[in-house]
Amino acid sequence: MLSAEIIAIGSELLTPEKTDTNSLWLTEKLNEIGIEVKLKTIVGDDELRLEETIRDAVERSDVIITTGGLGPTEDDITRQISAKAIGRKLIFHEALVEDLRERFRRWGREMPEINKRQAYVIEGAEILPNPNGSAVGMLARIEAKVLVVLPGPPRELKPMFETGVLPELKKLAGEIFVKRKILRVSGMGESAVDEAIAPIYKSFEHVQTSILFNRTEIEIHLRAQSGSESEAENTLEELAGLIGKKLGEAVFTTNGELMEEVVGSLLAENGKTLSVAESCTGGLIGERLTDVSGSSKYFIQGVIAYANEAKIATLNVSPSIIETRGAVSAETAEAMAKGMRELAQTDYAISVTGIAGPSGGSEEKPIGTVFIGYADETRVKSVKILLPGDRYLIRWRASQAALDYLRRQILKNFQG
Amino acid sequence: MLSAEIIAIGSELLTPEKTDTNSLWLTEKLNEIGIEVKLKTIVGDDELRLEETIRDAVERSDVIITTGGLGPTEDDITRQISAKAIGRKLIFHEALVEDLRERFRRWGREMPEINKRQAYVIEGAEILPNPNGSAVGMLARIEAKVLVVLPGPPRELKPMFETGVLPELKKLAGEIFVKRKILRVSGMGESAVDEAIAPIYKSFEHVQTSILFNRTEIEIHLRAQSGSESEAENTLEELAGLIGKKLGEAVFTTNGELMEEVVGSLLAENGKTLSVAESCTGGLIGERLTDVSGSSKYFIQGVIAYANEAKIATLNVSPSIIETRGAVSAETAEAMAKGMRELAQTDYAISVTGIAGPSGGSEEKPIGTVFIGYADETRVKSVKILLPGDRYLIRWRASQAALDYLRRQILKNFQG
């Protein structure tokens, strides 16, 4: 398996606010063709450190990718330093300057002289065109190794990598195909999942299985490697199918979809409409559902009934229920769902009322107590859950639990 | 100024899903005491690469911090490799084993023999206790330099760094204080901001000013360095004050607060209540407002009027307005705000209707067209904006613009 290193260049990446995200995308692309990332470095506009970093990387790894530092200003040092690190000269390409001048002309501007710097290319390197920016990339071969120099902005880097670099690296890596699949699970704990599926995945020697706890969900990551693309895919399909069968409807996707996408597809496929009444989630469920493009087909309306008066006036919750049972209760959740459905005249309505904290908890109803309500044409029901975490996590988990509750009801309605 | 390098250790940090977040926190802490991070490395459980990385770091930087790789298993190699990289032995500390045994006993378990590995410490290094986990940290002095070895989990790393490392590094760095301040600006472009304030910040030699474009907002980052803490703070206050005066109400915070916090404080201070009618933002404004703890004091209700029927039935928007002007129009936005305010009986209501894409645009109303409505006791008004970006960005920017519109109205109402 070939090894790779990624070097992100730019002093702004060494501040507390900025993190290098290009390397995550590049890692995924490299892994897919069977190249393993062994080291990542983030270095500022520091000539000595950058030179040493590139030289070390070229010595110990097969593929070296740098990102950033190709702008036209003085502190963009990647061009000179990468050439220096591998002992080559920079060659001036008149054609690149002409091309840049022409681009600036089209934008109605004259090319600043400073941009001439971007016409220097490492001796013997292939030029990688940049349709989305002024900095070309470079691909230099050093015996069997490859040094790839890419611009920092993702919208310049990504197409350049896919068009100019990936095909070359594929040849270098040989016919190794690595395929990934992400299953997401709702309503089960990490160890319960592992206990249930370990006997299955352990019999698949060529698939690497890891169970990750990701914010609110259990994710099952499968990674298969093979000399044949279809074999890798088929193996994954088979394993994912067996896991899906074992865990049943707790698996809400085998394709890495989000819960709001899964629920949206179920509604769209069955021609059903939805409305949502939210208290402690404050609009989060509506926001997640409408983040999916095309959601106007099934999502009709939401009410954020934060104050009790809003629950009473808009959702027709009886004041006596709130008085006797409390705003956070099964009865209120059910009344909210019922009232929401009637107001919006939808096929389904769900509701959430709970205590997200940091204050407002009691012995009887501690922080994290959440009731989820559901209403359809014939039934109104609810469920109580107790969620761990801070305000942010409780709200997110409540939104996820509500969407999952709806998902399971729809599955029941349509699959018996 | 002292230079630092951070080395994050662990193969999981080289996967496409994981990113190293400890280093952002550490960078902030180091910057605050005047130590500059010059390089960050992420390396897997790879002995040769890790050894080389630590050795290079110790050669070129003053402070070297490693995170992770201190667990009890075979692939936790930081202990041995960091000792090897600086040419020292590992010393077994019986007292650490006793301490671990005692902890396991308290958890009602017997210490696995494998945990004995965690009792090895670099020769001559100071032991950093870990109240939240089983791996102690280490602080080794190498002449004037310092190598700090920390565990990976943030809840173990952070207290250990603050208690055991920060005071030592402060001594090393001397009396340099670096203070930061973030101003956020809404409703102005990057270059307009720079043009307006460059003459001001350029006269402050000891403050580093950078103008960043962060998703939807312009942020002005100020960083002052001084031998006196109060001097650094006063300089920042003075500069922030001058910038605030120059840019006026476009600056919505000089303390790094979020827009929803600023709006919430304004409402709470003035004893006013708010309701929100959302179409294209789908609950995002409600979600942002209620993400602030204590928001139930002023946030009463929201309506996500996604479908036209919801606008008509719940918000009392006249069908003829929607028919003649369209759902995305000034008239609809104003009717939504007016209807929302009447329904929720709040002091203020705001509304948003627009086209977030990717479909639904027309020549007359392209994707990104958004109308924001506002209603109070005496006035109903609206503003039209055209937002760039994809669906996610348009929705986020629309929510920001709506909150900002409300903020400016409240300021006008209460400050003349």
Image (spheres, coloured by chain):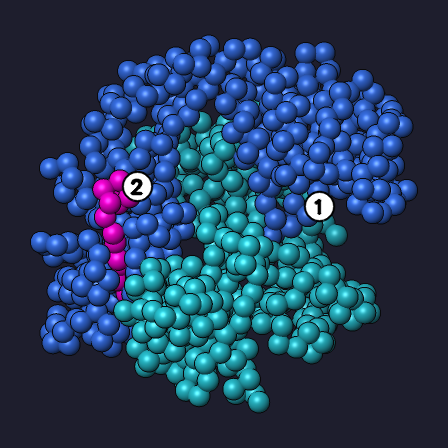
Chain colours: A cyan, B blue
Q: Is residue B197 above or below residue A4?
A: above
Do discs 1 and 2 share a chain?
yes
Q: Residue at x 73, y 38 (%)?
A: B133
- Which tag, 1 or 2, sits closer to the chain's start? 1
Q: Is residue A126 visible?
A: no
Which sits in the foreground, B77 or A5?
B77
Q: Residue at x 20, y 74 (%)?
A: B312
Q: Where is residue A238? Give x, y as percent.
A: 71, 76
Which sits in the foreground, A390 or A413?
A390
Is residue B270 toward the left or the right of residue A334 in the image?
A: left
Task: Assess disc 2: are there few (<14), some (14-19) or many (≥20) residues with their C-alpha within 10 Å of its C-alpha.
Answer: some
Q: Reply yes or no: does residue B276 show up in magenta.
A: yes
How far is the residue under mark 1 from the one under mark 2? 44 Å
Quarter of the image where one finds residue A364 = bottom right
Q: Quarter of the image containing the C terminus of chain A?
A: bottom right
- Residue under circle 1? B11
Residue extent of the magenta highlight: B266-282
Is residue B6 toward the left or the right of residue A117 in the image?
A: right
Which sits in the foreground, B355 or B322?
B322
Tell me the amino acid under the disc marked 1: Ser
Secondary element under disc 2, as helix, strand or loop, is helix
- Residue under circle 2? B265
Q: Reply yes or no: does residue A112 show up in magenta.
A: no
Task: Assess disc 1: are there few (<14), some (14-19) or many (≥20) residues with their C-alpha within 10 Å of its C-alpha.
Answer: some
Quarter of the image where one finds residue B47 = top right
Tell me the amino acid under the disc marked 2: Ser
Which sits in the foreground, A124 or B293?
B293
Q: Is residue B381 above or below residue A323?
A: above
Tags 1 and 2 touching, CB below 8 Å: no
